[in-house]
Amino acid sequence: MVIYIADRYGAVQTTASSDLPENKTLISDTMTDDLNSGVKTYECELIATDEIKAAAVAKNYVLADGQLYTIISDEYDNREQIISLYCEDAGLDLLNRVCGEVSKTSKTFEAWITNTLGSSSKSGWTYNFGGVDKSKTKSLEYTSATSATERLLDILDNYDAEMYFTYDIDGLKWITRTINFTDARGQSEDIKSLYMNYDVEKITRKRNVEDLATVWVMYGKDKKPLKKLTGYASATKDIEKKGHTFQVVGNEVRCIDAIEKWTSSLDKDGRVVQYKYTNYSGATACINYAVREMCKIVDPVTTYEVALRNIYDGAQCGDQVKVLDAHNNVLLQARILELTKSFVTGSASVKLGDFKALKSSKAELNVDAISQIFTLSITSSAGLVGNGSIETVLTVTLYLNGQTISSVDELPVGHLVWYEDGVVVSDTDPRISDSGFTFSTGVLTTGHTYKCALED
């Protein structure tokens, strides 16, 4: 791995490498791609040569794996002679401008982007709308000045869109920079499966209703109630969003299905009310904001923490994956929201989110999990500890996608094979009974190894 450190004009000042004998100055690194912000960060440790100390300073650029980063902070350890860099996607630095207020108006997605950044020729960016409907129109307003990055993220949120930055590099200089707009990043068709005890170390689920609400009482700019805002009209039809139905009544935005769901003997009307104050002067923008945000809280917030052992080659931020724990009939679909990898070591890890529980019947596990997961567990009738010698019967318990199999007739594939000290024991061995599910060892002394395997 070789990285290039350039000045503010793109002229390369020095390089660092992790594997070139004459320039082994890149000690460690991590790249993190964050789906929510659409940007990447890069951190590395460098041996502090004179050239690196002069070039690796805040606001200069790092080019790593074809991606351009701005050095945000540099730290020098004079005892260890190491420089540590924290860098952010250069897109953030190159979008460093302030966007002013915008009165409520209707524009296409493309027009909102150019309103924020200017035309492509003016901003220096190429806009790639290949993954989103750039002609889709929405009415938005901005009542205060924000950074261009903040404005972009809000526009994307309104359009359910995402973005990421790419750069075309010619030699050691970038010649074009592109903002890519898309409905969803990553692979959604070729869904990879991550299996418990192989790819997945642990799955922890947590549910809470701390922020649950079924009704928002809305206020706009200058604390005006919703029905006093410009363009207000009580809803004449249902508003459908992400599987939920909303209605506007007076100052309230109500989630009808959530109200019905949370009605109980203790809460007879299902109304869980929150008061929200915004800076919107137009009713449409205020209602759209309420519906968009309420979708996140009308159900219990369910989060899963998935600790991974392995991540598949070619993983990208935004990819859809399935997480399977066959023993507990847990089947989830999720997206990679954050991808962290090291170019130096080749290691990678991910953070998963946007979880969706899939059906977890036996049939669903067999079909949707792509492959069948077998697990074998061996127990000893005389326990696992003996004094000098032990006579025992070993029993194997076989699970298929979490379901216990107790006879050979239930095996969909293969057969059980016992090994004694690495040698296959014949199926006709009189010590094997129940068609291979139990094995009588006889009197054992130390130094023997027994294994059972399901084989074709």
Image: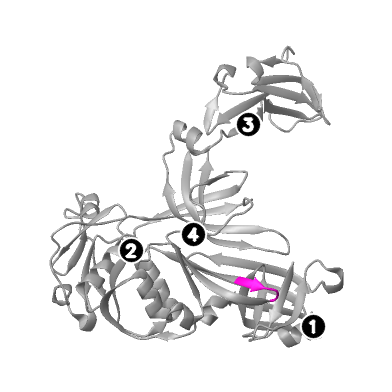
Q: Residue lying furthest right in this view?
A: 22
- What is the quadrant of the N terminus in the image? bottom right
Q: Which residue is mark 1?
A: 79
Rounded to the nearest angstrom, the CA distance separating label 1 from label 2 is 49 Å
First along the sequence among labels 4 and 1: 1
Point out the stretch of residues depicted in magenta: 168-172
Vertical comparison of 193 with 180: above or below: above
Residue 25 relative to residue 362: left or right:
right
Residue 424, x across and y down, in percent = 78, 22
Residue 271: in magenta span? no
Of the numbered discs 3 and 2, the one sitting upstream in the chain is 2
Identify the main secondary structure in magenta.
strand
Q: CA distance from mark 3 to mark 2?
A: 43 Å
| Residue located beneath label 3 in the image | 376
In the image, is 136 to the left or to the right of 338? left
Mark closest to the chain's N terminus, 3 or 4:
4
The residue identified by callout 2 is 211
Residue at 74% across, 88% down: 54
Q: Nearer the viewer, mark 2 or mark 4?
A: 4
Q: Earlier in the sequence, mark 1 or mark 3?
A: 1
Question: Which one is earlier in the sequence, the residue at label 2 or at label 4?
Answer: 4
Give the percent coordinates (x, y) of residue 431. Answer: 73, 15
| Residue beneath the point at 17% across and 77% down | 230
- Would residue 455 be found to the left or right of residue 39 on screen? right
Q: Secondary structure at mark 3?
A: strand
Which of the labelled discs sits on residue 405, or is there none? none
Q: Nearer the viewer, residue 198 or 152?
A: 152
| Measured Cα–Cα span from mark 4 to mark 1 | 43 Å
Category of crowding for the residue at label 3, using alpha-carbon neighbours closer than 10 angstroms: few (below 14), some (14–19), many (at least 20): few
Outermost residue toward the front? Answer: 121
